[in-house]
Image (cartoon, rainbow, N blue to C red):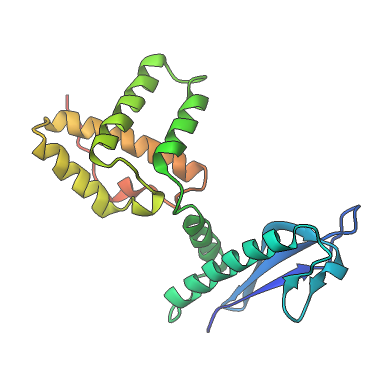
């Protein structure tokens, strides 16, 4: 069964200001899920036929741009899985994953480390910072979309070519795995790619 998407104004709830939520509907295998887009408008500012927000809404241009981007991402997923449509749960996860693809990994980590200073030892934070600085020497910028199993394998080969000992290399992998785990917790990644890359332990 072909999966379908549609942007609608959800009319079963209305705020005190008289606004209703704009949602993306995904249907697959006779199951439907509503995905909130964090946009609410008054019913008179919504065009049902064209599925756009009208000029009566102050931020209609910005909102319509967001709606177009969300719709295009959703449509891209449907085409990528055209013959075997994703379940509603898998679709939501994939949509969230693609929305984070263009986020800079280093910027994300540096922001997270500020929070970790509260619960982690100073030496531990310094260790993560050192790892990120070393990785920047090899890859000055790194988007989430670039982090794949192949990337991890290339990083491993690069470390070997630098003459580093395996014990040191796998410590770096452990750091990378932890930081990717933070990204999974924050919804920037669907899963930790180290699930497919074994980290050896040294005495």
Q: Residue furthest top?
A: 122
The correct choice, above or below, for 182 with respect to 97 in the image is above
Quadrant in which residue 71 is drawn: bottom right
Q: Is residue 185 visible?
A: yes
Which residue does the image show at 19% across and 48% down from the upper left?
154
Image side of residue 101 versus residue 74, left or right: left
Residue in the picture at 85% in, 63% down: 42
Q: How many numbered marks does the figure carry?
A: 0
Q: Position of residue 14 (x, y in %)?
A: 87, 59
Between 54 and 92, which is closer to the camera in this rendering? 54
Q: The C terminus appears in which quarter of the rendering?
A: top left
Percent of width and height locating residue 35: 65, 62
Residue farthest to the bottom? 1
Q: Is residue 81 visible?
A: no
Tell me residue 191's x, y (percent): 41, 51
- Look at 16% across and 37% down and name the residue there: 159
Q: Is residue 130 left or right of residue 20?
A: left
Is 120 situated above or below 109?
above
Question: Which x, y percent locates residue 18?
Answer: 90, 58
Instruction: Please indicate whether residue 105 sits to the left or right of residue 27 in the image.
Output: left
Q: Quadrant of residue 173?
A: top left
């Amino acid at each position: 069964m072909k999966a379908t998407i549609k942007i609608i104004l959800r009319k079963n709830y209305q705020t005190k200001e008289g606004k209703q939520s704009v949602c993306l509907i995904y249907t697959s295998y006779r199951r439907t899920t509503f995905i909130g887009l964090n946009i609410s408008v008054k019913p008179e500012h919504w065009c049902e036929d064209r599925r756009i927000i009208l000029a009566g809404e102050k931020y209609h241009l910005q909102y319509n741009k967001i709606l177009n981007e969300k719709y295009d991402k959703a449509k891209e997923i449907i085409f990528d899985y055209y013959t075997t449509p994703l379940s509603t749960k898998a679709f939501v996860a994939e949509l969230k994953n693609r929305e984070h693809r263009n986020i800079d990994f280093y910027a994300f980590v540096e922001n997270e480390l500020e929070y970790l200073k509260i619960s982690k030892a100073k030496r531990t934070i310094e260790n993560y910072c050192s790892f990120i600085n070393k990785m920047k020497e090899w890859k000055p910028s790194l988007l989430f979309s670039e982090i794949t199993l192949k990337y991890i394998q290339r990083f491993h080969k690069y470390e070997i070519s630098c003459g580093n000992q395996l014990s040191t290399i796998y410590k770096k992998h452990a750091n990378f795995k932890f930081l990717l785990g933070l990204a999974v917790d924050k919804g920037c990644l669907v899963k930790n790619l180290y699930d497919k890359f074994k980290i050896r332990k040294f005495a």
